[in-house]
Image: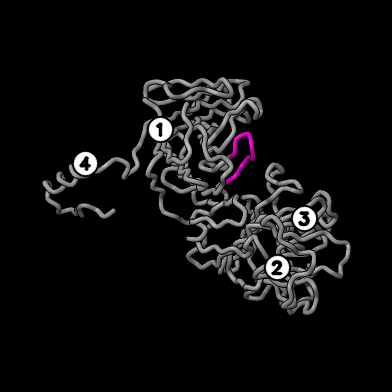
Amino acid sequence: MRALFTLTYNTPMHKIRTAVFLLLLLPPGLSAQWTNLFDGKSLKGWHQKGGKAIYSVEKGQIVGETVEKEPNSFLCTDAEYGDFILELELKVTENMNSGIQFRSLSKPEYQNGRVHGYQMEVDPSPRAWSGGIYDEARRDWLYIPNLNPAAKPAFRIGEWNHYRIEAIGNCIRTWVNGVPVAHLIDDLTPRGFIALQVHSIYGEMKPGMQIRWRKIRIQTQNLQPRSWDATPVVNLLPNNLSAQEKAQGFTLLFNGNDLSGWRAVNTRETPGPHWSVQDGQLQCAASDSTEARSDLVNAQEFSAFELCFDFLLREGANSGVKYFVDEKLEAGKSFGLGLEYQLLDDERHPDARQGAAGNRTLASLYDLIPAEKPEKRFLRKPGQWQQARIQVYPDGRVRHWLNGFMVVEYRRQSALFRALVARSKYAHYEGFGMNTSGPILLQDHGDAVAFRSIKVRRLRESLLLCD
């Protein structure tokens, strides 16, 4: 719709009054309207589930207070919401964990009515995960703000913090004090209630700790999402590119249907018999024979890039994703050499105990730098999908990520890098890892592994997201 008037600093007051009057006469529904969820006086429109934390109203604020030996408590809206934009303010003065539930459910058949669903985190602890997205009583963490470290200082303990959630279709975005924190693509729960959480007491928490909420309002129609930005996206939809990923320059290397764009390493031939596409997955079958094995390499070459992929290892599996592959180093062989993001079942495969200091374990720079693993709760078991990222910056910095945690960081072509290569199994390969560009390779190590959502973008100096 075109604007009825263009107002400037010098616009006469009578024209401004006329413009406002005409806007008031416009038919409803042309712009989003805010609805207050809290009347400032009572808990009308809300009910409590879960634990028995204390909820009260004081000075136009909802106050939540911890109670000893109670599970997580939730003050829930009577109404359910699908697509919406929610804004509110909250304040904590101590290190008290909490969160804002949304699109959440409570059903008798699910853990006896336990509240479950998406949560925008309130985390004043030193890890600073406020604004991240947690899946309460279901899948654990979905978006860890480590991916977006520039947003971690946004939350201010002891002050009022402005929270914003946009949940529109499968796109979920969060802001803390105007700073974008999380961008999640997921479609597990399209609708549910909103709830204010008082977490059960753990760690340094104690009875009587308080969190306060105020100015709780929502939009449900004619929603206008904020513009796309540089926030990294966690996309849980297989082989999908979201609008923000496209705006950031990502493209799919695997289309989910066939092996277009991929070939057997060191040849121009189609991949060997172990590789197939099934159910939107690029699968490598297990085999005891080494003769039929063939690594899979992409037709494109990359120098500075960000590669994201999902992977699934079967029990005891060994595989890898290689970059800066140089096919000349092992010309004519069925395998390729390059810098390797190791994929391994650490608990069951003997390679985890080879090499030096664990540099052959999951997510390591294989045989060069061991990965600093997150705690076990963030690692998936064989048969479960995990998410990986490899970031290679124009200045030579390289980072490996696993399930939202940065686990390896080094500078390619540095003196330290050269020293590590010199003491590795690659020492006799002249120029190993030093080439300026190369293709992406998926390893056939004879074990069952699957890939999906393989996406990449080329990085420029203006796109250094993790600094």
Indicate left or right for 413 with 197 as reference.
Answer: right
Spatial separation of the CA atoms under disc 2 and disc 1: 49 Å
SS label for mark 1: strand
Identify the mark nearer the N-term, 3 or 2. Answer: 3
Q: Residue at x 74, y 59 (%)?
A: 283
Q: Name the residue under label 3.
A: 344
- Magenta stretch: helix, strand or loop mostly: strand
Taking the image as shown, residue 12 lies to the left or right of residue 25, namely: left
Residue 73 in magenta stretch:
no
Range of magenta residues? 135-143
- Kind of residue at badge 1: Ile
Marked residue nearer the N-terminal end (1 or 3): 1
Could you give the CA–CA distance between mark 3 and mark 4, rounded to whole angstroms? Answer: 65 Å
- Residue on which disc 4 sits: 25
Kindly report the distance in space between the C-alpha atoms of the residues bearing marks 1 and 3: 47 Å
Give the mark nearer the N terminus: 4 vs 2: 4
Q: Are marks 4 and 2 in contact (CB under 8 Å)?
A: no
State the residue position of label 1: 216
Q: What residue type is labelled 2?
A: Leu
Question: From what the image shows, is residue 79 above or below residue 129?
Answer: above
Pointer 3: residues within 10 angstroms few (<14), some, or many (20+)? Answer: many
